[in-house]
Image (spheres, rainbow, N blue to C red):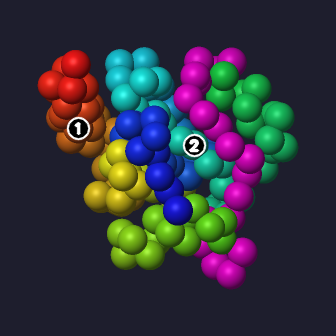
Amino acid sequence: MFSTSALNQVSLVVNVASECGFTEEHYEDLQQLQRDFGPYHFNVLAFPCNQFGQQEPGSDKEIDSFVRRVYGVSFPLFSKIAVVGTGANNVYKYLVESSENEPDWNFWKYLVDVNGNVLDAWGPKVSVKEIRPKIAEMVRQIIRKKKEEL
């Protein structure tokens, strides 16, 4: 369902919103993660969502333009989706089912390994900086494994 194994990447999947109180800190920290670890071994995968507080009202084009201009975002930003309820996108159905954690606000983060397994999930009050050491170790493991294979 969510295999990144062909790319051998770790992913942090996040439901994002442009007008949330968590927007600035999260986008800045997510972009720093992408700068430091991406795009070969790691990617932030951002899914705009307007389900919580109507805080992502723009069109896909407006959202993309805003986050690239204001936060310098270079990670993949997908089309706006539903992440909960009957209309939830299949990616989020998988993330929720695998982690047993359903988003109840913007900026839920799901850590996915190279085999597509959801390892952990965090709500918006957990900062990206708190998750960073876990991601760094996973990226180190990928690099070590590649060196061993050479």
Q: Quadrant of residue 30?
A: top left
Q: Which of 38/9 is in front? A: 9
Tell me what residue is drawn at x 15 percent, y 25 percent: 148
* Three-letter residue code for mark 2: Ala
Residue 32 falls left or right of residue 65: left
Pointer 1 with pointer 2, Cβ within 8 A: no
Dot 2 falls on a residue whose secondary structure is: strand
Tell me what residue is drawn at x 56 percent, y 29 percent: 75
Instruction: Give the mark, 1 or 2, whose residue is nearer the N terminus.
Output: 2
Q: Quadrant of residue 54?
A: bottom right
* Three-letter residue code for mark 1: Met
In the rendering, which numbered label is found on residue 9?
A: none
In the image, residue 65 sits, relative to residue 113, either above or below, namely above
**CA–CA distance between discs 1 and 2?**
20 Å
Q: Quadrant of residue 50?
A: bottom right
Q: Residue at label 2?
A: 46
For the record, the magenta segment spans: 69-87
Residue 6 falls left or right of residue 47: left
Query: Which quadrant would the C terminus be assigned to in this image?
Result: top left
User: Local crowd at mark 2 within 10 Å, few (<14), some, or many (≥20)?
Assistant: many
In the image, residue 57 sits, relative to residue 37, either above or below, namely below
Toward the bottom, the furthest residue is 86
Asked if residue 20 can be seen in this view, the reply is: no
Asked if residue 98 can be seen in this view, the reply is: yes
Toward the front, the furthest residue is 150
User: Local crowd at mark 1 within 10 Å, few (<14), some, or many (≥20)?
Assistant: some
Residue 102 falls left or right of residue 33: right
Dot 1 falls on a residue whose secondary structure is: helix
Q: Give coordinates of residue 115: x percent, y percent.
A: 36, 52
State yes or no: residue 148 in magenta.
no
